Every structure is written in structure tokens, then in C-alpha cells.
Amino acid sequence: MKSVFSTVLSGAVVVFALLYAHSVVASSDHKVLTPDDVKWAPAPPSVPKGAEAAVIYGDPSKEDLFAMRLRLPTGYHIPPHTHPKPEIVTVISGVLLLGEGATADQGKTTALPAGSFFVMAPGMQHFVYTEQETVLQLNSSGPWGLTYVNPQDDPRKTQ
């Protein structure tokens, strides 16, 4: 099994592929936001209740680039899951505890403080915990999706 750090390095290829594929951005796509411009709302139902999300660029439901921030509360956990597209993530504030594999074990996570960066390749099984409020910025191309390793962990079935 690859480590989180080797995943980040191998994910660099994915980052460059995305940048190359979208190297020309139309002038109508110009956007500038300050922190006060970010509008938070409940996160998508694919993540456990309690998180908030703010789409700051694009539309995660469409086939194109997007940027979304997730605000995860203290004591939050997203069980093992995968995504169909590469995810490029920066920890904006707080500390994200990131683990990989099909079984969540908080003792086997890597603490990623504010400023940390990681890339997850499509299909990479991973899970997260927080011990304090944590904000992430997730960049990817849509449509965005999340599939739980254990279908019983899917909050869409219980919320």
C-alpha cells in the first residue's frame, strides 16, 4: 500500500495533467474572493452531518474545474471512501488527520497542519478525522463524487 506521501508525489502527474488540460481559462472565468466573500452552507449529503461547504469556483456537479472549501467541526470523521476524479487538497486552517486504506484507524493517520497539501488519485481509499475545526480547499474536476468503502457508512442512507 502506498503511503500518503508517495501518493502526493505520484499525484503530481495528475496535477500537471489537470493544469495542462485547462491551461487556457476564459477571461469571463476571472474571479477574486476575500475571506468575507465565502458563503458557507451545509456540506453535500454525501459527507456526515456537521460539515459546511462553500463552492468558490465552478460547479462540482459539472464536467469542469471547481474549487470547494469544506469546514469540518471538532471531532469530525469521514469514514473510508474514494473519489472518481483526482483531488488536490490544501489545509487552510486547523489540522486534518488523514489516513489511507479500507479501515479507519485514527492512530494510523498523518497530521496535516494548515498549509499542508496532498493529492488523492481516483479510487484511493482514505479517511479523515479532526480534533479541532479544520478548513480544507479541494480542487478537482467534476462531476464530484464520493463512494464509501463500506456502504453502511454512507450518510445519504441515514440522513
Image (cartoon, grey):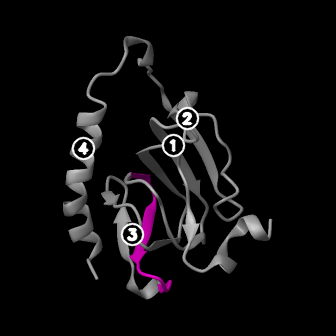
In whole angstroms, how far apart are the C-alphas of marks 2 and 4?
A: 20 Å
User: Is 102 a magenta residue?
Assistant: yes
Q: Position of residue 44 (x, y in %)?
A: 66, 52
- What's the residue at 71%, 62% (across, down)? 49
In whole angstroms, how far apart are the C-alphas of marks 2 and 1?
A: 9 Å
Q: Find numbered disc 2 in the image and state the secondary structure of the residue it sits on.
A: loop
| Sequence order check, earlier mark of 4 and 1 | 4
- What's the residue at 67%, 65% (across, down)? 48
Q: Position of residue 146 (x, y in %)?
A: 56, 61
Three-letter amino acid code at the position of disc 2: Asp
Span shown in magenta? 89-105
**Residue corresponding to mark 2:** 59
Identify whether 151 is placed above or below 90. Answer: below
Q: Find numbered disc 3 in the image and state the secondary structure of the residue it sits on.
A: loop
| Sequence order check, earlier mark of 3 and 4 | 4
Identify whether 149 is placed above or below 30. Answer: below
Q: Position of residue 56 (x, y in %)?
A: 52, 34
**Residue corresponding to mark 1:** 68
